[in-house]
Image (cartoon, helix red, strand yellow):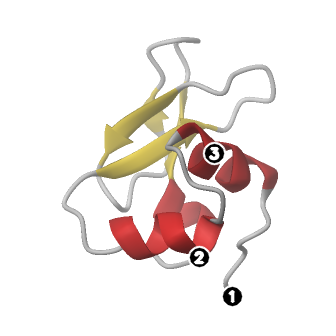
């Protein structure tokens, strides 16, 4: 199921300079590394990680809480 309205996905798209989540996904769907965002409620750190990343290390808050934008959208 696709979820293009998840708040963290919207924040990630905006941080990457996109007004629309769909445009963000179109540009990154086939990438070998893609933008990811920390899922912790008190952290919005972003980094480029593997497309299927679900628990990457967040350098800002120190938790294994980074998730790929493609995972948020339900593409992977």
| Label 1 Cα neighbours within 10 Å, binned few <14 / some 14-19 / many ≥20 | few
> In 3D space, how far apart are the residues under numbered discs 1 and 3 (Cα atoms)?
22 Å
| Label 3 Cα neighbours within 10 Å, binned few <14 / some 14-19 / many ≥20 | some
Q: Which of the two discs, 1 and 2, labels the residue nearer the N terminus?
A: 1
> In 3D space, how far apart are the residues under numbered discs 2 and 3 (Cα atoms)?
18 Å
Residue at 37% of width from left, 62% of height from top? 52
Q: Residue under label 1, please give it.
A: 1
Q: Residue under label 2, please give it.
A: 74
Residue at 19% of width from left, 60% of height from top? 32
> In 3D space, how far apart are the residues under numbered discs 1 and 2 (Cα atoms)?
6 Å
Q: Residue under label 3, please give it.
A: 14
Left or right of 57, for residue 10: right
Left or right of 25, for residue 21: right
Left or right of 7, for residue 61: left
Please identify, in this view, whether the residue under mark 2 or under mark 3 is nearer the observer.
3
Q: Which of the two discs, 1 and 3, labels the residue nearer the N terminus?
A: 1
Please identify, in this view, whether the residue under mark 1 or under mark 3 is nearer the observer.
3
Residue 29 has which mark? none
Q: Which of the two discs, 2 and 3, labels the residue nearer the N terminus?
A: 3
| Label 2 Cα neighbours within 10 Å, binned few <14 / some 14-19 / many ≥20 | few
Position of the C terminus, as image quadrant, is: bottom left
- The answer to whether marks 1 and 2 mark residues whose Cβ atoms lie closer than 8 Å is yes
| Secondary structure under the numbered disc 1 in the rendered image | loop
Q: Looking at the image, which is closer to me, 32 or 39?
A: 32
Q: Looking at the image, which is closer to me, 15 or 1?
A: 15
């Amino acid at each position: 199921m696709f979820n293009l309205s998840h708040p963290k996905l919207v924040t990630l798209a905006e941080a990457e300079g996109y007004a629309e989540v769909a445009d963000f996904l179109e540009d990154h769907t086939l990438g070998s590394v893609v933008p990811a965002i920390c899922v912790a409620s008190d952290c919005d750190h972003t980094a480029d990680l593997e497309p299927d990343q679900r628990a990457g290390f967040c350098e800002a808050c120190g938790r294994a809480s980074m998730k790929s934008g493609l995972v948020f959208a339900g593409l992977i």
